[in-house]
Image (tube, rainbow, N blue to C red):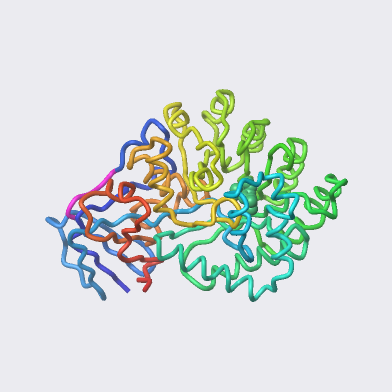
Amino acid sequence: MKTLIKNIKQLIQVRDHHTTKVSGLEMNYLPTLTNAWLLINDDKIENYGGMENLPKIEADREIDATGRMVLPSWVDSHTHLVYAGHREQEFIDKIKGLSYEEIAAKGGGIVNSAKTLQHTNEEELYLQSLQRLEQVIKMGTGAIEIKSGYGLTPEAELKMLRVAKKLQKAHPITIKTTFLGAHALPAKFKNNKQGYINQICEEMLPQIAEENLADFIDIFCEQGYFDLNDTKQVLEAGKKYGLRGKIHVNQFNSIGGVKMGVDYNSLSVDHLEVMNDEDIETLKGSETIPVALPSCSLFIKIPYAPARKMIDAGLPLAIATDYNPGSSPNGNMNLVVSLACIKMGMTPEEAINAATINAAYAMGLEKTHGSITKGKTANLMITDVIPSYGFLPYSFGNNHIHQVILAGKLIQ
Ligand code: NIG
Ligand code: FE
């Protein structure tokens, strides 16, 4: 099946195979082709070029993209999309002035979501998650990472990961899964944190590996949650099963999680709202990519990751939604791209690089996703008729995605 897209006003993020991620020094450059065509063969990008050199192509389907931009789909490298229920009551309590601790004391927070999820059966959890997946697909996301971590028991953690894997069969979006057993300490282990770490490493992980349910491992490395010693044990255990880290660090405090992540050659370190100079230095020259989550900062009113500082230091940067019921009940990558520009001082070029090629790297998908490259998966978005790609972040809160193509299939 061949699809030809013609008269593309601008084909965006056109790269060769060699680009796996874009460093801070190059992020302000976004390679484009004006007045272009693109040919899809089955699920892959076969070729592209300028309209002045359009060869004779026998296509099964033609799409006229006059006035429209074509971009590689957004890549959302950090989400908790599989969850049960919602926490808008906490949101209201927060508006009324309750602190995070007071909300937690009322049974709120991560353990609140865990309780709901434990009582939600697999089919129901699947249906709730499927609805969110379909929502983000419409908003242009073509690859997504999904974490466990709202189960906090062996049964519930496995249930989450099974649901995440099952979602892969529903739609041609690319899904990677991450085991986040160490997201919060369940009440049962209140005075026995090591007991829970042991359960994660010795009970949950072997089963998850056996069933092939996770691609990566994660831990919430933060004061009051899990410390460096816990992080080391979890990353070590993950390594035994070939799972690289994608870890929550530096959301509220810098306690050495960035260095631990780099020491274990983690694929990414995520959140980074609080970064000191040493953390930035540590990331230089490493294979670990920093990931900022601006919609989390917006929603729970915490500082934004110092994106400008990281980019100016030459680091590559990715951005993601952190879609979850507590700190970012929103999976809209278009909004994240806007917030990167509005709140973190990134240029549209930097934000689009951070949400495509660098985000693909942050999911281990840099060879197949994140750019318009011959041979890559045909995951694309066709925009509305818009004046420029800068219009996308400028027109914040609006989505200008006209059509979505995933693995060569036009999604209705
Ligand atoms: O990535 N920081 C830790 N975990 C989630 C949100 C936790 C919650 O449900 O409140 C996050 O922001
Ligand atoms: Fe998160």
In percent of width and height, residue 110 lies at: 69, 53
In percent of width and height, residue 6 lies at: 20, 63
Q: Quadrant of the N terminus?
A: bottom left
Residue sitting at the far left: 52
Over which residues does the magenta segment extend? Answer: 31-35
In percent of width and height, residue 91 lies at: 59, 54
> Residue 279's image quarter?
top right
Answer left or right for 18 relative to 280: left
47 versus 309 height, above or below: below
Residue found 57% across the figure and 60% down from its top? 81
79 versus 1 height, above or below: above
Front-most of residues 268 and 15: 268
Residue sitting at the far front: 96
- Residue 244 shows in the view: no
Residue found 87% across the figure and 46% down from its top? 192
> Residue 85's image quarter?
bottom right
Q: Quadrant of the C terminus?
A: bottom left
- 34 in the magenta segment: yes
In percent of width and height, residue 82 lies at: 60, 63
Answer left or right for 365 relative to 403: right
Front-most of residues 36 and 146: 146
Answer left or right for 107 relative to 297: right
Residue found 75% across the figure and 47% down from its top? 237
- 15 in the magenta segment: no
